[in-house]
Image (tube, grey):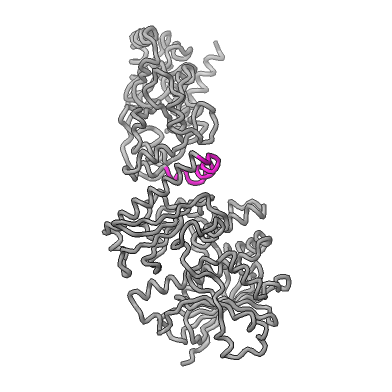
Amino acid sequence: MTTDTHKETLGFETEVTQLLDLMIHSLYSNKEIFLRELISNASDAADKLRFEALTDDALFAGDSDLQILVDYDKKKNTITIRDNGIGMTRAEVIDNIGTIAKSGTRQFFQSLTGDEAKDAKLIGQFGVGFYSSFIVADKVTLSTRRAGLGPEHGVRWSSEGKGKYTLETVDLDHRGTEVTLHLKKEASDFADGWRLRNIISKYSDHITLPIKMVTESEDSKKEEKSKEDEKKLETVNRASALWTRPKKEIKDEEYKEFYKHVAHDFEDPLVWSHNRVEGKQEYTSLLYIPARAQFDLWDRNSRHGIKLYVQRVFIMDDAEQLMPTYLRFVRGVIDSSDLPLNVSREILQESREIDGIRAGSVKKVLDSLKNMARKKPEDYEKFWNEFGTVLKEGLAEDQNNNKTLAKLLRFASTKDDIEKQNVSLDEYIERMNKEQEKIYYITAETFAAAKNSPHLEIFRKKGIEVLLLTDRVDEWMLSGLSEYEDKKLHSVSKGDLDLGDLEDKEEKKKQEASAEEFKKITDSIKAALGDKVKDVRVTHRLTDSPSCLVSEEHEMGANMERILKAAGQDFSSAKPILEINPEHPLTKKFDNEADDKRLADWANILFDQALLSEGGQLDDPAAFVKRLNKLLLEIDKK
């Protein structure tokens, strides 16, 4: 049956047009990767067909021998890559090729530097393999038919990569997808059998499907090639699952190329772990840790890290049950011998086998990170800079691996006063004062706010190191990290400050005397501030600043309140405690202040200054400015 041709010309999304231009220019020095990307797409299409055919064998339509064909035509200056995989409908072609449905699109373009080498890596992380065709082609034609649909549902897509593409309905007698590249004049050397074989061997030898080409003897007689000749094909890749081979037989380059296939990345991974588990459960895992964060890393619902196979048959490529959310950056494959071939997501959620595989895989990933931190600290620093914030989520989510994760954490601290997070908890404990019993930290919205917080003044004076926590996830992380190696973690901005044996008896006596001496002043300030504060008290945590705000030991901190408010959460905030420095000239002024109105103005200024110093926002900034100006003018008159 012949269908009426439905042809239309459509425009790419603006982002696609920009991306095409970037692909052509940024990756010009590594043009041959186009073939790797197209073969990888063809392999994915075959995997998807296998999976759907588990519940609908009719999709094979008598053709279950899945393969990829690569051909070329010197006269026409073309290369063709064809698969008999799942294929696409017209709507799927528009969605998959005409648009980029990615949450990180804007961030991607903002990250571009103009440096070709750096931008090439960014493009690889964004995962836009099909568009690499335009590195070598000035026109690309794609013909496809979805498995299960008739010949009249074929679709042909064509574009010169200049902002528009044509789409038409055509008759296709075979399912799957065929991509034909009309090569640029300067890329005509790719229309060569040996060149293509070398590229396939270099980048795609691990593809589990056979990649076939016409035998080279036949290639030389293409002009006289008959239909019978076309059947004389040879497999040009190893066509075996890399993860099933013994580790000692696999070269590092093969591991790296397989990663680029499975992760659709252009950059080598930082590390990988290849393991075969036998016993109660039998499965093989090959897990990779990338060198650079993906653009959708912060989308916790985006899951495309681990491909699940059962007895080498692809099942799904976003099996969230195989890896916890905080390890969503991990890429790789897991191949089980125990799960049923018709496994569903519902079965995965209730499977003890999956729970065991997940626990074992998480352990392998964390072991790899521990080894990297110990043996290759420079690589671990790269990892932490890219994925550290995500790894912190695990402290709140994964109690089973809490201790291991805590060892992997890195923080900024007052030791160096730099923003780089390079201090481990073990290093902190090694440097602790002999009398110190707690691990001290402060949370703030920015590094500057943490570093310059008045809460740190007594700690700096006594040489006590404090961890500076400024990632938004830190507040959540702390809910799962109350202690480490029997040392309690303690916020310097919460509760009464008790430095224990770090203070001598004379200091403690002086503090008690100050509290009694200033009781009248603290009572007056509390009365002036009313319901703004829970209490006002003298503190010894300040050495230079006149005041600061603290929370009760077990109440929500000010930084956490700001985060929740920014997220639109509705909650009743706790009143802070205002602490004043009895040695500061401003607080001493209260002792001689007889005018209640002026005392109230000074009290409110102390409160507002303390709020601003910790990164808070004033409820009435105009009132603060008015009070401050008034008092400054009065001082000037004197």
Residue 425 falls in image quadrant: top left
Q: Nearer the viewer, residue 357 or 129?
A: 357
Relative to 314, does residue 288 appear above or below in the rendering? Answer: above
- How many numbered marks are there? 0
Q: Residue at x 33, y 29 (%)?
A: 486
Residue 536 image point, x, y percent:
35, 19
Residue 388 image point, x, y percent:
47, 43
Q: Quadrant of the C terminus?
A: top right
Residue 361 image point, x, y percent:
38, 52
Relative to 97, does residue 388 appear above or below in the rendering? Answer: above
Q: Nearer the viewer, residue 568 or 263?
A: 263
Q: Residue at x 53, y 35 (%)?
A: 420
Q: Is residue 625 visible in the rendered structure shown here? A: no
Magenta: main secondary structure equals: helix
Q: Nearer the viewer, residue 229 or 576?
A: 229
Residue 221 image point, x, y percent:
67, 86
The stretch drawn in magenta includes residue 104: no
Q: Residue at x 48, y 33 (%)?
A: 423
Residue 437 falls in image quadrant: top left
Relative to 500, does residue 279 appear above or below in the rendering? Answer: below
The stretch drawn in magenta includes residue 376: yes
248 relative position to 218: left or right: left
Q: Is residue 501 visible in the rendered structure shown here? A: yes
Extent of the magenta region: 375-391
Q: In the orientation shown, which residue stands out farthest toward the bottom? A: 1
Relative to 384, does residue 62 appear above or below in the rendering? Answer: below
